[in-house]
Image (cartoon, rainbow, N blue to C red):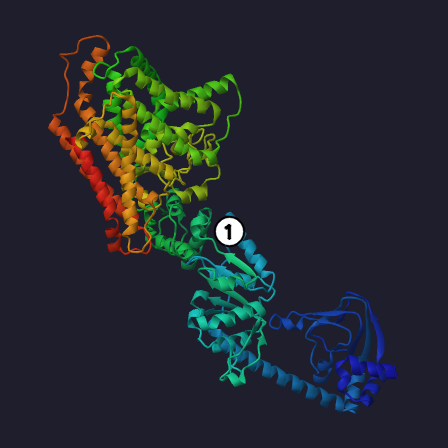
Amino acid sequence: MTSPETVIWLQERTSLGILSPEVLNAIAQVIEEQVVSAETDLVSEGNSPEALYILVEGQLESNTTNQNNPALACGFLPGAVIELKELLLEELTPFTITTVTECHLWVVPAAKFRELVTQYPEIAQAFSRQLAQELAQVTSALGYEQERSIALRPYLVTKAQRGIVGTSRYAVRLREQIREAAADRKSVDIFGEPGLEKDNIAALIHFGSPKRREPIIKVNCGILQTSGADLFGRAGGKPGLLEWLGEGTLVLNNIQELPEELLPAVTQLLKTGKYTPISRSEDSAAQPRPSQARILIVSEKTQPTVERSVGHIIKVPPLRVRKADIQTQVEYYTNLYTRSRGISKPHMTPEALRRLQSYDFPGNLRELKNLVERAIVQAEGANELTEEIFWPAETKKKRFRVNLLNAYPSLRRFLRSDWWPDRINYGFTATAFAIIVAVLFIGPQTRDRNFVLNLFWAWWWPFFLFLFPFLGRIWCSVCPFMIYGEITQKLSLWLWPRKLKRWPREQAEKWGGWFMFGLFTLIFLWEELWHLENTAYLSACLLLLITAGAMIFSALFERRFWCRYLCPIGGMNGLFAKLSMTELRAQQGICSASCTTYQCYKGGPQKGEGLETNGCPLYSHPAQLEDNRDCVLCMTCLKACPHRSVEFNLRPPGIELWTTHVPRTYEVALLFLLLGGIYLHRLPELQSWLGLQLDLTEFWQHLGLSLLVLIIPAALTLGAYGLIQVFNFNRKPRSFVELAYGYLPLVLGGNLAHYLRLGLGEGGRILPVTFATLGLSGEQLPILVAHPAVIAFLQGTTIIFSVLMTMFLTQKIAKQSVGTPKGLAKLSLLWQHLAAIGLGVSMWAIIVF
C-alpha cells in the first residue's frame, strides 16, 4: 500500500511525521489494512508486540493491572501509533488495548518493521531524540513540581477532617450550601463564630469539587507581608503563592486580620480574578496577571467589601441553634476518641444529654469536642457518661439559678398533680368566691362587721403584696375571676359547639395595656370616691365586674385572653412579678433539640412523662419568656413537657430588669398609677401634711384632688429625668421608659406599707368580725393585733428598704448604658436617686406618722 496521500496523512496526523518522506514512503509500502470489530482485544498485556498499529478511524482504550502506574490506562484517538516504543526497545506490552468502536487500522507486522529499522537507522535515531526531549521536559516539570511543593508545603491542607454531622435543618442547609459551592469555581465567604471548624468547611468545598486533585492551601491573613509579595510574588523575581497554586484553592483564614494595605489588591483578585505582582519601583510596574486559583475566605464576621465581591456566602450556624445535633455530635466525637485510644465506648445518659442541650457552648464544636474527651477521661472506663461528668460553665442567662424542682422532688410531684391548681380552683375557690360575693351583698356593710371585707382588705392585699417578691404572679393561678371565665368557656362550648376566636394579638399588644391602665384608674377613683374598702356591696360589684369581663371574653376568645391582656389585677400582678426571686422557665437547648410537638404551648395527648393538657392558658412558651409578666405559674407546661425541660428556678430578685428585660410604655404608665395610688389611699393624711383645707365631701373637689394626686408623682419622676438629661455631660442616658422600672421596688414597698396598717391592725380581729357577720356576739373571742409602734416600725423599715432597692435597681439598669463611665453614670443618676428619696420621705410622712 503506497500513495502520496498515505505519506501526507502519516506526516500530518501521527507521531511518525518526524521521519523523512523516504522513510515514510517505505513504511507505507509495507502497511496492511485491517478492520477490527468493537469490544475486541487488539493487544494483550505482558505479550511481545506482534505489529505496529496506526489508528485511522475508531476509538481504542487501554486497561492495566499495574496499580503503581494508573496513567497507563488511557484512550486512543485516530492518528495514534501503538506499540512503537515496545518494538524499538524490544519490551513487552504494558497494557491491554481494546476497541471501543469498530476500528480501521493500518498494520505493519513486527518482522517487517524491524527490517525497516535495520534498513533506515534514521527511525531509531529520530525516536531516540524525541525520547530525550520528552525526558528533558519531564525532568523540568519534575523540578518545577518539587519547587512548587516546597513553596506550598507549609500551607498545604491534605484532607477534610469530617463532614457536617447532624440532621437538623441547619445541618441539612449547610450541606446543601457546601454542595452548591463545590459545583462551580466562584469564590466563597465562610463566616461564623469561633470554634465552628470553618476551615474544614473550606476543605469540604475543595475536595468535593472537580478540581479536588489540585492542591489546597490555607494562609493566615495575619502573617501576610503588608507588601503582598508572599501572596502575589515579585515582578521578574520569586513567584508568589497564587502563581505556585495554579488551579488549586487558596483559603484566606481570618480575613479580618488582613493588613489594610492588601485589602484593595485582594478585593481586585476577588472581583476580576487578576492580581499584580509587586514591583520594586513605580517605573517598572508589573502588568496584572490572571489567576486560576479559587479563593475561599474564612472569618468570624462577614466583611462588607468582601461580601460584595464573592460568589457564595455561607453563614455557619452556631451550635446553640443546632441543639438537635448535639446528640449526634457527641456520638461522633465519642467514636473518634474511643477508636483512637482502643477503649470501649461509654453510653451517655439522658440527663447528661439534657445538660449539654441546656448549655449554649460559646466555644461551639471545639468546646463540645474537648468536653466529650474530658468526660471520657474522667469516666475512667465506666459504661456511662453521667450528668456530673459534664461541667461546662453556666451561661449568663443561667447564672445564679437553682432549680427547685431538682432540689425538692416532692415539689415537682405536687405541682404535676391534679391538686395544683385544678382541685384547689374547682373544689374550693369557685365555691368560696360565690359565698364571698353573697356575704358582701346580704351581710353587714362595714369592715368591722363583715368578715369578707376584712379578708379582702386586711388579709388579701397585704398578703399578696408581700408574696410578689417570692412567688410572682401566683395569685393568677388560683384567681376566681378566671375560674368562672373557664367555667363559662366550657359551658358555652357545650351548649353552642363552635370554634372560639383566635386572639387579635397585634391589637391586644398595642392597646391591651392601656385598657388595663384605664380600668385601674377607674377602680382607684371608685375606691376613693365611694369608699369601697368600707362598703361591702360596692366591693362585691367590683369583684363581679372583673369576673364579668373574664366570662365575656372567655366566651368569645380561646384560652385566657382577659387574663393576659385586659385584667387590671393581672396587669398589676405581672408588673410586680418582675421583682420575684423565682421564675418558671424551660431550657431552650432541650426544647429546640428534643421537642417537635410543643405540647407545653399547644397542648396535646400524653407523651412519655408528659401529661395530657390543653396547653398554656396565656399562650406563652416557657423557653421564650423574657420576664415573669406572662406566666401565672399554673404549671401546665411542667405537666405537659415529656423532656424535663421546665424548671422552677430560684434567682436573684428582678435580675431580668437589668439583663434581658424589654420595657413597655403602658407598663410604666401603670407603674406610676400604682405609685399615685399610694398617695390617693392616704388623701386625708396628705391634706394634713400639706396643710390643705379641701372639703372631700364635695364630689368635684374630691375628684379633682384625686386626679391631681395620681398625676403628681409621675410628674416629679419625669422632672428628675429631665435633670438627668441636662446634667449628663453630653452623653445620652437610658430612655425614661427603661429607667422608670427602677421605681418598681418603691411602688411595691409603698403599697405594702399602706396595707400593713390594715393587715396588722385589723387582720387579727377576723374571729369577732366573723361572729358579727353572722349576727352573733364575738366580744370574748381572741384577737391578735400589733402595737401601733410595731406597725409604724415595720412600715418605716419597708419604705427605707424599698428606697434603697430602688436606688440599687436604677443603678443596675443604668449601668448597661454603653459608653458612659461608671463614675459619670452614678453622678448623672443623682436626680433620680433624689426623686426616690423624696418619694420615700413623703410616704414616711403620710403613712408612718
Q: Is residue 577 left or right of residue 231?
A: left
Q: Identify which amino acid the numbered label 1 is placed on.
A: Ala
The correct choice, above or below, for 461 with respect to 240 in the image is above
Can residue 580 be seen by looking at this rendering? no
| SS class, disc 1 | helix
What residue would you read off at disc 1? 171
- Along the line of sight, which residue is nearer the eye, 376 or 179? 179
Asked if residue 573 shows in the view, the reply is yes
In the image, 439: left or right of 372?
Answer: left
Q: Residues within 10 Å of mark 1 (few under 14, many from 20)?
A: some
Residue 80, x across and y down, in percent: 75, 76
Please state which of residues 578 and 609 is positioned toward the viewer in this rendering. 578
Q: Quadrant of the N terminus?
A: bottom right
**560 versus 164 height, above or below:** above
x and y, in percent, of residue 287 in the image: 57, 80
Which quarter of the image is occupied by the C terminus?
A: top left
